[in-house]
Amino acid sequence: MIDVVMLTVVGVLMALAIGLVVKYFGAKADPLAEKLGELMPGANCGGCGFAGCGDYANAMATGKAKPGNCPSMSDDTLKKICELLGVQAEKGEPKVAVVCCSGDDHHTTRVAFYNGVNDCLNAMMVAGGAKGCTYGCLGLGSCARACPFGAIEILPTHVAKVHPDLCKGCGKCVSVCPRKVIKLVPRAAAAVNVYCNSPEKAPVKKKVCSGGCIGCRKCMKAAGENQILINGFLASVNYENPPAESVTEVCPMKCLRKAD
Amino acid sequence: MITQIRFYGGIHPSEGKVSNKEDIINAPLQELYTVPLQQHIGAPAKMVVQKGDHVLRGQLLGEPGGFVSAAVHSPTSGTVKDVTTCLGPAGATLPAVVIESDGEDKAADPLPPFENWQDADPAALKARVGEAGIVGMGGATFPTFVKLSPPPNVKIDTIILDGVECEPCLTADHRLMLETPEKIVKGAQIIGRILGVKRIIIAIELNKPDAIETMTKAAEGTGVEVAPLVVRYPQGAEKQLIYALTGRKVPSGGLPAAVGCVVSNVGTTAAIYEAVCLGKPLYERVTTVTGTPVVKPGNYRFRVGTLYRTALELCGGVSEDPAKIISGGPMMGMAVYSLDIPVMKGTSGILLLSRDELVQYSPSACLRCGRCNDVCPMSMMPGILSAQIEHQKFELAEKWHVMDCIECGSCAYICPAGRPLVQHMRRAKAVVNAKKRAAAAAAAAAAKK
Amino acid sequence: MREYLLLIVGAVLVNNFVLSRILGICPFLGVSKRLETALGMGGAVIFVMTLSGLVTSLCNKFLLVPLHLEYMRTILFILVIAALVQIVEVLLQRFSLTLYKALGIYLPLITTNCAVLGSAIICATEDAFKGAIFKSTVFCSASAVGFALALVLFASVRERLELSRIPRSFQGPSIALVTAGILALAFSGFAGLGA
Amino acid sequence: MTEQTIKMPDMSQLVVSSSPHYHDRDSVRKIMFKVIGALTPAALASVYFFGWRALMVILLCMVSCAAFEALFTRMMGRESALNDGSALLTGMLLGMNLPVTVPVWMCIVGSLAAIGLGKMVYGGLGGNPFNPALVGRVALLVGCPAAMTTWVKPSGCGFAKWVDAATGATPLALIAQCDATSGATRQAADAVAQQYPSVLDLFIGNCGGSLGETCAVALIIGGIFLICVNIIRWQVPVCYIGTVALFTGIAYAFHPCAHFNPLLHILSGGLMLGAFFMATDMVTTPLNRKGSVVFAVGCGVLTSVIRLWGSYPEGVSFSILIMNALTPLIDKFTAGRPFGVMKVGRRASSKEIEAEKNPTKK
């Protein structure tokens, strides 16, 4: 009996002490941000434009950001978050990354042996890398290392390749690519792409790469109106009005290709 | 006599200055010149000629494209054959004008020379430096006009002429000091006039005793001092030079002006003299072509736009195939893979390395020997920094002062593990700068809203 | 004076709670990834352990022993410690939110930290501390300092390990355990000190 | 010169890399083999005093360390780093830290602990926070204290068979014994002291102990060589040995009958080996000079504390391992502020710039 009494007395005393401390020193946390944080996917990919999932959750809780910017969130989660915030669900258009370069070892020339850090930005700062084309993929895999989903592979022929089924379109690779070869395009319209990034004139391009766009405009003629845009010497797909897949057959350089 | 203060760190690479007895040779006229419009740090010059135009030597090709920018002039008379791009030594593609020489080398009317620069308006003198397109010829290619325009609240009291040439192999500044000392001294006095400064010091390393003697003689009675300095790389780095001569430390992230100094390369100074007293814009410079494979290493006065290929032909080609071609010196120069790169205002040397001299960087781990620590003239910790950068911890690297790196290469020179330390630093600096720019842009966008 | 000096050296170095008695391993591995959090955790544990040493030895001397309730020791001590941890949590949340977040789940887990309970029970059972409240408090405090020392040492080593190329199968907790083992080997050199 | 004679370079084999393009041509391999070379005199001395088995122990450790390194790099799928010589050096140091009577299997297990636990799990050379050879030695010492503390007296006649030698305590074991009698009379202390080898014997290595730690003169020669070729910093051995001398000296001054004189302390045990070859290990000690000094003094204090008051007779290995653990902290706090940085983490204020501008005014 006495043991129970003793325990109760000590327990009450301790509870009293905690109560006093809470009363005089208690802080209020934001329960909304905490709940949101638990719902976040936790990939910390940064695709939303914030430093990580927690940061984004805080921003949403304080009304500084809208839900729907997260590329790797399932629709279910998004719905839950919207309910918590009491707003209408709106999700951005799903996107996919495309490496706009055909410059693998078979197509582009190698002008020197690069010796140094295995990183694209580093290689580019040393004489612009060792590939002949100064606009193409350097193939050292900075994008692959940055990808939080393992969606980018560096082919043995030294060019990056995105696996669209794994890609969530977060855009991390776009921000680390020093050559800006990787582009984020609407997933629905990404069936056909121009795999070249060089704005140079055709003869200059041809000297260094056998797979680059020469600006011959054949595709523009074959495709429907306003489906292929030509900017200087470089064709590009109008992703708002994508051409049919058959248009790839006219490209003499095999530079306008179906997504692989 | 100026007492020299020893700066922390530094190394002693082999000097290899084989061409220091070779007189400067004026390179013969070429048929084609590829003149890049961006030979300086800052905005590229805006082209003022068109394809097919006839131009004269010294005629303006491009005017400054901003405050931090510089004018570009034609190296000879002829027609503008093409407006195109060319490869720069850093691998970037630069806008360029190709001039086809007409063989007459007719000079355009010179800018009106200042007869009495001693009494001329400093602002006019400074404007001339800008008009003549003068940039720092030691390699940094910072527009000199900007350098000579310190913010109004800064008081400059010392001008330091950098004749140190601490880069191994290069001898261009050395020969220039031997052959045209009076131009350098007068140029220095012009800078003094522009900035209203009396104290002018010419710094020369002790491995050039003949230059010290010549410059001392030329400076007699002018009040310009000559300071012989101990041979130690990087004695010519701006911050270390100022510290060695004045004991002042340029604050982290600051410019020499913050401690009341302006540092100018001797080549730049000679160019300032020519621009002011002869009215000649900057379209040629002295460049050292050297290296073991080069048949006849020497110092040449090249017109801007001469291709490296031409430069090498003038030196009799090579005796063996080089393993590396470097634009600049061996410590801070840039390796290039093409000879179709033009000599620019900042090209202090073209260096070829043979296969035996080639050192390959290796991806091995840091041994933590601490030698990089001992030699770093900025007393940073390159070993720890490089490991942080390898693991993409750029924010941590910024905390460990990676932005103070002057990329002198002392750490990578000494590293027994052969790690590409300087390259790591460059990457971190590029990443941090990009982040800062992005933050600034975001802040500007937010302010607009 | 000499007695207390030996007591402190013994508790901090020779019989270090983590490296010699192998107590309190959970936070030792959990919050040692960064030096700042390790310092914070060390501070929190010093606070809790000192107070719990004082309160539990008071309870022991004036409640348990007179009432012959020694068998209630564990449950009472846990109650006291849990309450103290709650107080620390509230205080931390108020005064250092970042640290509060960094410590995360490990902060409430101090409750079940065997180092805290261990020190209290050692004081209650070992003859050397019987009834000596001040001595018990000093011992608990010194033990906590030893814990914090091991934690800080370990965190600094782990920060360095983040920059080395550890094979994938050893990354994370496994390399931490290997390191802790070697650190314990090194600390075994203090054996016999102050005896 | 005619056009034909001008040879232009072949552009297809050019290398591009970041500056600098010069290197002083020192390499990890050169450093490691220089250290091995510096250890050789002490190794030869151990063979002279302890017989051919000493050579066998050292070589066995070197070979098994190299073999384990090769095995583990292979398992990790990394490029072999055997030719940098670091595994051989670890093996040599480990061998020199063992007594001559050590069984063969212990040499191999020690090598496994040194290379496996001490080095390869951390990703190989450069990543290990603890000195691998010491990890091996301490693992053996804690695991099999009996085998690790069975010492033989050297025969003194050179290259003898080890079995002929009589067993005997090391000088430090004697000191510990002496400490145990510290409450006793002067005579008891003197009796122990009589068994103690002379300073000269200690200096040339004619005393019991681990293989590599006995011959002080050979170790000093090796150490001076390493200082001359700029592989180790002179501050480390000087501060380490100096601190031990100071502390044991103070203890001796207070209790001359309870403690031995500092000269005997610094010449006996693994202090010389530790100070010249282990506390100077590049990977596991602080980066800069200031840090090295802190490290060495810390080692000295800990060694003296363990020797004077601990139950282990020898504290060099333990103290170096503990200081290894402290190295990252030392690095952090001794990192100097870079040139032009006024105070860590802060840009200069105008007042400070003024002060830096006119250094003479102060």
Image (tube, coloured by chain):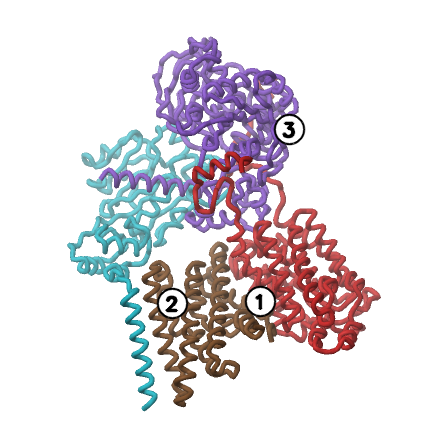
Task: Chain A: give its colour.
Answer: cyan
Which of the labelled discs sits on residue B185, or is there none? Answer: none
Up the image or down, B266 lies above or below A21; here it is above
Residue annotated with mark 1 = C186
Amino acid type, residue under disc 2 in the picture: Tyr
Up the image or down, B403 lies above or below A31; here it is above
Compute the Cα span from label 2 to label 3: 63 Å
Q: Position of residue B429 (x, y in %)?
A: 43, 41
Circle 2 residues within 10 Å: few <14, some 14–19, many ≥20: some
Which of the labelled discs sits on residue B206, or is there none? Answer: 3
Whether residue D76 is visible, yes or no, is: yes
Amino acid type, residue under disc 3 in the picture: Leu
Marks 1 & 3, CB-CB < 8 Å contact: no
Picture quadrant of residue B298: top right
Q: Which chain is brown?
A: C
Picture quadrant of residue B170: top right
Q: Say yes or no: labels 1 and 2 on the same chain.
A: yes
Q: Position of residue B286 (x, y in %)?
A: 54, 21
Nearest to N terminus: mark 1 or mark 2: 2
Marks 1 & 2, CB-CB < 8 Å contact: no
Q: Say yes or no: labels 2 and 3 on the same chain.
A: no
Which SS class for mark 3?
Answer: loop
Residue annotated with mark 2 = C106
Compute the Cα span from label 1 to label 2: 27 Å
Task: Chain D: give its colour.
Answer: red
Q: Nearer the viewer, residue B299 or D270?
A: D270
Up the image or down, B420 lies above or below D242; here it is above
Q: Which chain is purple?
A: B
Q: Which chain is indicated by disc 2?
A: C
